[in-house]
Image: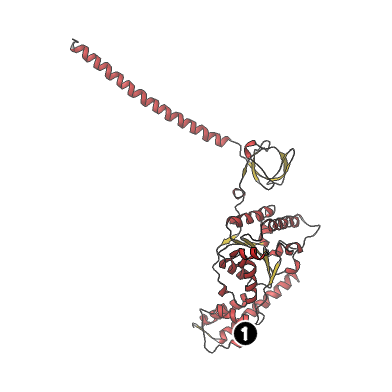
Amino acid sequence: MKEKSEIDVEKALKNSTMGYSVDNSQVELENRVLKETIEHLKNELAKFQKTPLLAAEVKDIIQDGVMIRLNNGNEFLVSTSPACGKILPGDSVLVEQKNLTIIKKIPISKVFNVEKFVIVEKPTTEWQQVGGLAKQREEIKEVVELPLLKPELFEKVGITPPKGILLHGPPGTGKTLLAKAVAASTNSTFIEVVGSELVQKFIGEGAKLVKEIFELARDKAPSIIFIDELDALAARRIDIGTSGEREVQRTFMQLLAELDGFKPLGNIKIIGCTNRRDILDPAILRPGRLDRMIEVPVPNDEGIMEIFKIHTKRMKLDSKVDMKKLVEGMKGMSGAEIHAVCTEAGYFAIRKNKYIVTQKDLMDAIDKVREEEKAEGEEYLHMFG
């Protein structure tokens, strides 16, 4: 038998060994954590030391390589990485800074967020809110609404509806209102683009923006692209011009290419809007593009009455108001000017601390709107006459 002292020594050695074992496992765990932390820090440091990639646009594919264009306008013939996949002209790519080798293709939206530069909405305008344009309402329903809601009718008959329409007429006659109403009736996304802003703000990027607008329309289909002030973008082309004019022409050519690129029975429609139809390039109006033209004139007497009733629906009018006299006074006014008359008449009543609008308030409002219109016309003649 072992003596008591020997047993005590064995127990002590055993406890000591277990303690070392526990200590070793803790040290190994701490070492592993420290190694992972060091590796993470090395990766983070490598990110900061890595040379950034450049964004470029593919201009052409040729036998010796790919022609790219950088944002500064310089063009280079470069090679591609096998991992970048198939590349086509117009694609956006990332290239290495030193030798400009194409590393990978990127979606266009990652380079240029088009939704920041156009108005995208779901309009709530109803047809009842459009007054004095019965003929134009029917035309736009036939050309835009019917193909979007019942495309099978056109397929059965065997005809192709227009891809787009052109609304033309004086300012304030309801062209935008018509476009929003048909977008609401078809539950379409309404994408509004202003032609003058497109050519002024995006020199060097206009063609790319037009391409992305149509991509956005396809993503949010059914959709209606409404191009306001189309004459700023689609005026007659000239042979010699400034660099700005050449850029406008490049943007215009991209618009024509996009119009030719989608199917007439698709769920995208184009509505152009202009006050100057006479200066538009014939290329935009030929069959297959904006080949249906709808004139939106100033309202006639019946139209004036309809528009006036729409804008005074929530107003309290004096029972003695002479409608014939009012219509006579508003002859030649656009829908926007009739709206302005109703608003000014309400202000005249408020100034008198009344809530009922009288005949005098309305006639005074007509005179005020006429004077403002005359003053604006004289100022325009002074500036450009």
Picture colour scheme: secondary structure
Tell which of 76 and 166 is nearer to you: 166
| Residue 5, picture quadrant | top left
Q: Amino acid at mark 1?
A: Val
Q: At 70% from the left edge and 75% from the top edge, which residue is drawn?
A: 377
Q: Can you name the residue that lies furthest to the bottom here? A: 320
Tell which of 135 and 131 is nearer to you: 135
Horizontal and vertical percent position of residue 379: 70, 73
Q: At 36% from the left edge and 25% from the top edge, which residue is drawn?
A: 25
Tell which of 228 and 253 is nearer to you: 253
Q: Is residue 47 visible?
A: yes
Query: Element type at marker 1?
Result: helix
| Residue 174, picture quadrant | bottom right
Horizontal and vertical percent position of residue 143: 65, 68
Give the number of marks.
1
User: Quarter of the image containing the C terminus?
Assistant: bottom right
Q: Is residue 42 left or right of residue 238?
A: left
Q: Can you name the residue that lies furthest to the front here? A: 156
Residue under label 1: 327
Vertical placement of 158 versus 30: above or below?
A: below
Vertical placement of 134 versus 105: above or below?
A: below
Q: Is residue 173 visible?
A: no
Q: Residues within 10 Å of mark 1 (few under 14, many from 20)?
A: some
User: Quarter of the image containing the N terminus?
Assistant: top left
Horizontal and vertical percent position of residue 335: 62, 76
Horizontal and vertical percent position of residue 302: 62, 82
